[in-house]
Image: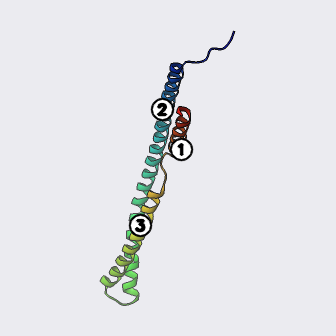
C-alpha cells in the first residue's frame, strides 16, 4: 500500500501542534529556571544579610579602635582621629558599592531559556519557509 501524501491542512495542523508543544516546553523551562534562580538568590541574600550584620558590628568596633589609636598615637584631638577614619571608610564604601553594582548588572539571567528561545525561533522560521 502506498503512503499517502499529507495534505496542506495536515502539515499546518502538525506545525501548530509542534509550535504549541514548543511553547509549553519553553514555559516549563522558564518556570524551572526562575524557581532555581529565586531560591539561589534568596539563599544568597540571607547569607549576605547575616554577613553584613556581623561585619557592621566588627567594623564599628575596629574604626573606633583605629580612630582612638590615631588620636592617641599622634597626640591629636580625638575628633581628628575619627575624622580621618570616617573619610577613609567613606572612600572604601564608595569603591565597594561601585564594584558591586557592576557585578550585579553583568550577570546573564536564565541563559538556557534565552538560548533555546533563539534556537526555536530559528527552527520555526526554517520550518515555515
Alpha carbon of mark 1 to alpha carbon of mark 2: how far? Answer: 14 Å
Report whether 57 appears left or right of 20.
Answer: left
Q: Is residue 34 above or below residue 62?
A: above
- Counting residues from the start of the chain, the first of labels 1 and 3 encountered is 3
- Image coordinates of residue 103 in percent, x first then y, are 47, 60
- Taking the spot 44% from the left edge, 57% from the top edge, the residue there is 105
Task: Give the number of the mark in front: 3 or 2.
Answer: 2
Residues marked 3 and 2 touching at CB (< 8 Å): no
Q: Is residue 121 above or below residue 4?
A: below
- Image coordinates of residue 31 in percent, x first then y, are 46, 36
Residue topped by disc 1? 115
Crowd tier of the residue under label 1, counting other residues whose Cα lies within 10 Å: few below 14, some 14–19, many 20 or above? few
Residue topped by disc 3? 98
- Taking the spot 53% from the left edge, 19% from the top edge, the residue there is 10
Q: In terms of image quadrants, where is residue 38?
A: top left
Residue topped by disc 2? 23
- Counting residues from the start of the chain, the first of labels 1 and 2 encountered is 2
Secondary structure found at label 2: helix
Taking depth in this image into account, of 82 and 117 the one nearest to the observer is 117
Alpha carbon of mark 3 to alpha carbon of mark 2: how far? Answer: 39 Å
Amino acid at each position: 500500500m502506498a503512503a499517502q501524501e499529507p495534505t496542506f491542512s495536515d502539515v499546518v495542523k502538525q506545525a501548530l501542534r509542534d509550535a504549541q508543544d514548543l511553547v509549553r516546553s519553553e514555559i516549563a523551562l522558564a518556570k524551572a529556571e526562575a524557581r532555581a534562580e529565586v531560591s539561589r538568590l534568596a539563599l544568597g541574600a540571607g547569607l549576605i544579610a547575616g554577613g553584613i550584620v556581623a561585619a557592621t558590628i566588627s567594623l564599628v568596633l575596629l574604626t573606633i579602635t583605629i580612630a582612638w589609636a590615631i588620636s592617641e598615637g599622634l597626640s591629636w584631638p580625638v575628633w581628628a582621629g575619627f575624622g580621618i577614619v570616617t573619610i577613609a571608610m567613606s572612600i572604601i564604601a564608595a569603591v565597594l558599592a561601585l564594584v558591586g553594582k557592576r557585578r550585579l548588572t553583568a550577570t546573564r539571567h536564565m541563559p538556557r531559556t534565552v538560548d533555546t528561545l533563539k534556537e526555536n525561533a530559528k527552527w520555526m522560521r526554517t520550518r515555515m519557509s
